[in-house]
Amino acid sequence: GKLLVNTESGVVNSGEALITIIPANEPLIIKATTLNKDIGFLKEGQKVAIKIDTFNFQKYGKLDGELI
C-alpha cells in the first residue's frame, strides 16, 4: 500500500485519497536511489535492510528485502 498523508494532524482535501492498498499476495517493490560511490557495493540478489525515513526504525523496525 501507499500512505499518502503521513503527518499527524495532516490536512486533506475532499475526495483526496489517504492510502492505497495492494493485495497481500503481491510483492512489494521499492524503487530507491543510491550514491554513485556506493554502486560498486550493490549486487543483484543481495539482502538489504530498508529503513523508512519518516518512521523511527528503532521503534517501528525495518523491512527486509532483496535487490532485483
Image: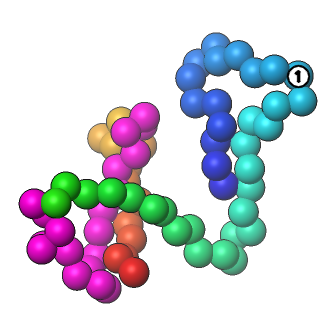
Quadrant that contains the C terminus: bottom left
Which residue is at the far bottom?
45
Look at the image and say whether residue 19 sits in the magenta stretch: no
Drawn side of residue 3 relative to residue 13, left or right: left
Give the answer, above or below, for where 47 lies relative to 32: below
**Residue appearing at x 66%, y 75% in the figure:** 26
Residue 56 quadrant: top left
Dot 1 corresponds to which residue?
14
**Residue appearing at x 45%, y 62% in the figure:** 31
**Residue appearing at x 64%, y 42% in the figure:** 3
In front of the other: 13 or 62: 13
In front of the other: 37 or 27: 37
Look at the image and say whether residue 52 sits in the magenta stretch: yes
Which residue is at the far right?
15
Residue 25 spot, x, y in % from top left: 69, 77
Drawn side of residue 32 relative to residue 5, left or right: left
Drawn side of residue 67 relative to residue 28, left or right: left
In front of the other: 57 or 52: 52
Residue 14 quadrant: top right
Crowd rating for badge 1 (residues with CA inside 10 Å; few <14, some 14–19, many 20+): few
Q: Secondary structure at mark 1?
A: loop
Q: Is residue 24 visible?
A: yes
Q: Is residue 59 visible?
A: no
Of the residues shown, which amino acid type is indicated by label 1?
Ser
Residue 28 spot, x, y in % from top left: 56, 68
Residue 65 spot, x, y in % from top left: 39, 71
**Residue appearing at x 33%, y 57% in the figure:** 33
Q: Which residues are magenta?
A: 37-55
Color style of the picture: rainbow
Give the answer, above or below, for where 61 lies relative to 54: below
Residue 1 quadrant: bottom right
Drawn side of residue 13 relative to residue 25, left or right: right
